[in-house]
Amino acid sequence: MGRDLTVFMVDWGQLGALPVENRIGRLDDMAWPWELDDVDDDGYERAHGWLRPPGRAPAWCAEYNFLTTTGAHLPHVRAGAAWADMRPLVDASVREVGDSFLGGLIWNADQVDDPAASGWGGVFPPATDRGHPNVLLVCLPEAVAGKARAWERVEPCLEGLRGPFAVECECECECECECECEGWAGRPDTFEGFVALLREWGGVVTEAARRGWGLVGLP
């Protein structure tokens, strides 16, 4: 079974008030499946991806349920790999804001750099098992605000990524049967799926930035 990804937007002041060694466990407690109504007590509909168990979750964090991934981490990895391949073919101005938006979410400029090894700058304890890090992403509030600004510039350019995606990510197999070419070489199955995931991340960073909160991703 593959690794999952659970993303929270978090009030950094409230998270910082917890002992470092308790932070992962506190967030992890919130990822259990609860019985949810269609709309929670803060008005977030399940269809919009945000989950907050009525009367159970703290007011300082909310979990996001990616509608296009069924909770799996692999689609994010594939999308990040697609961007890494596509970016040399993208206009420099779009590449710059795309890097700013996607960096640290689904793509890292330096794949050797492993923030989990150093405990994410003291926000969380260092991972004890490098093969299964306790944290998959950390995005501080100030970084989230920058990503929200980048998303505003990236969103109008999404259709322009179709050509680079076709060049780098679409299978060139000419067979007429339904073979196993989709998602070849660990890339997204379709351009539409790739863009849909980016739009979800755009919604996540926009909402977190509106609140002045940060983001945390747990496996």
Image (cartoon, grey):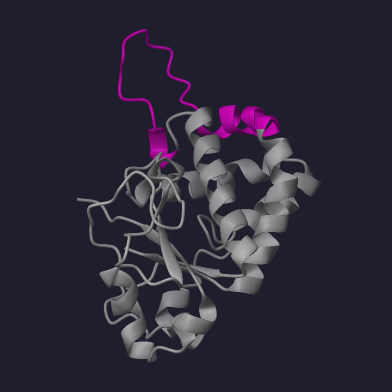
- Residue 58 in view: yes
Rendered view: 193 above or below 174: below
Locate residue 211 relative to residue 69 in the image: left or right.
Answer: right
Q: Position of residue 107 (x, y in %)?
A: 53, 56
The part of the chain drawn in magenta is: 159-187
Location of the C terminus (image quadrant): bottom left
Rendered view: 92 above or below 185: below
Rendered view: 133 above or below 36: below
- Residue extending furthest right? 93
Q: Position of residue 156 (x, y in %)?
A: 73, 37
Q: Quadrant of residue 28?
A: bottom left
Q: Position of residue 109 (x, y in %)?
A: 59, 61
**Magenta span includes 18:** no
**Magenta span includes 183:** yes
- Residue extending furthest top? 176
Q: Residue at x 41, y 47 (%)?
A: 66
Q: Quadrant of residue 183?
A: top left
How many labels, in total? 0
Near-viewer residue (27 or 1) = 27
Q: Residue at x 67, y 30 (%)?
A: 159
Q: Residue at x 57, y 27 (%)?
A: 166
Near-viewer residue (184 or 74) = 74
Q: Position of residue 102 (x, y in %)?
A: 59, 54
Near-viewer residue (15 or 94) = 15
- Residue extending furthest bottom? 19
Rendered view: 218 above or below 125: above
- Residue 133 in view: no
Near-viewer residue (41 or 16) = 41
Q: Residue at x 40, y 57 (%)?
A: 41
Locate residue 144 relative to residue 96 in the image: left or right.
Answer: left
